[in-house]
Amino acid sequence: MKLIVTGATGLVAQEVLRQGLRNPAIQKIVAVARKPVTIPALEGGVDASKLRSVVVPDYDNYPPGVKEEFSGADACIWTVAITPTKSKDYPFAEVQRICQTSTLVGINAMREAGLGSPFRFIYMSGIAAERDQSKTPPMLPEYSLMRAIEWITDIKILQGETENRVLAFASEHKVAEGFEACVVKPGLITHDAASVARAEDLQRTMGIPNITVEEVAAAMLHQVIHGFEKEPLVNEDLVRIGRKALEDGL
């Protein structure tokens, strides 16, 4: 399998790389980021020869050389986003560009490069994202609805439904090209003692579930390798799949 991982310097993507470079089912990983992904950052007995670092200064632009790297890929795990907490520090238009426009431009660039069939695309969203405009999410509603609602005016698309549009793109190209997509919706992702403490507090006070970075990475890798169990995959699905994959050493 040839796997594309975008946002490859991020927390979750780095764990995907660590596990993917150990997995014999994966022969090559194209690690896409705005800066080089270096081998020292991927410690832990990995097969570094499988890694190909591809730098894209802008996730909205893929030159021919980058598309050549995508050619023949069998899957992609897309992790590029601004988290809900950090989104408050950016103009909403910039959040929308990074979380929505970049995703749609990237998925189309991969298709144009020529892919394997089937091609499995995982879009990493979050538990708060809401596809149904009639519902108002309790936290950061503008951010959450951006991933779910599309408002079309005579001037421009004001908001996008990233999840829905990714799934629609896959549906459009499924029969002829074997394009498949799945949205994963984890809760709070833990990776150290501080994040575990915060997760326990949010679980207790707000009922927000959590998952370890190892579990979510293992679950996504399992799904692109073996096929999507369901869509979407919510936190409890990811925990179950991830723990089993880690136990099995896959």
Image (tube, helix red, strand yellow):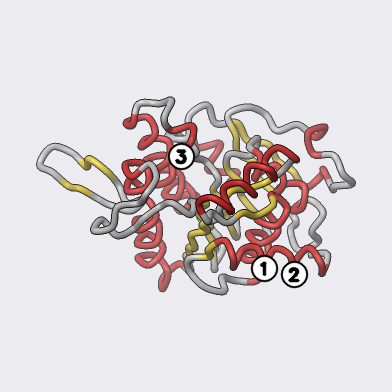
Q: Nearer the viewer, residue 31 or 8?
A: 8
Q: Amino acid at mark 2?
A: Lys
Observer-nearest residue: 245 or 87? 87
- Mark 1 and mark 2 in contact (Cβ < 8 Å)? yes
From the top left corner, tell me how far across and down residue 200 is, in percent. Answer: 64, 49
Name which residue type carries label 3.
Answer: Pro
- The x and y percentages for residue 65 are 55, 36
The answer to whether one can see residue 71 in this image is: no
Q: Is residue 91 above or below residue 209?
A: above
Which element carries disc 1, helix, strand or loop? helix
Q: Nearer the viewer, mark 2 or mark 3?
A: 3
Q: CA distance from mark 1 to mark 3?
A: 25 Å
| Disc nearer the start of the sequence (1/3) | 3
**Category of crowding for the residue at label 2, using alpha-carbon neighbours closer than 10 angstroms: few (below 14), some (14–19), many (at least 20):** some
Q: CA distance from mark 2 to mark 1?
A: 5 Å
Residue at numbered disc 3: 84
Which amino acid type is marked by label 1? Answer: Ile
Above or below, 248 relative to 221: below
Frontmost residue, 243 versus 111: 243
Extreme-front residue of the structure: 205
Residues at marks 2 and 3, CA–CA distance in whole angstroms: 29 Å
* Residue marked by disc 1: 241
Kindly identify which numbered label has been placed on residue 244: 2
Residue at horizontal 35 percent and vertical 58 percent from the top: 164
| Residue 229 in which image quadrant | bottom right
Q: Badge 3, how many Cα within 10 Å: few under 14, some, many 20+?
A: some
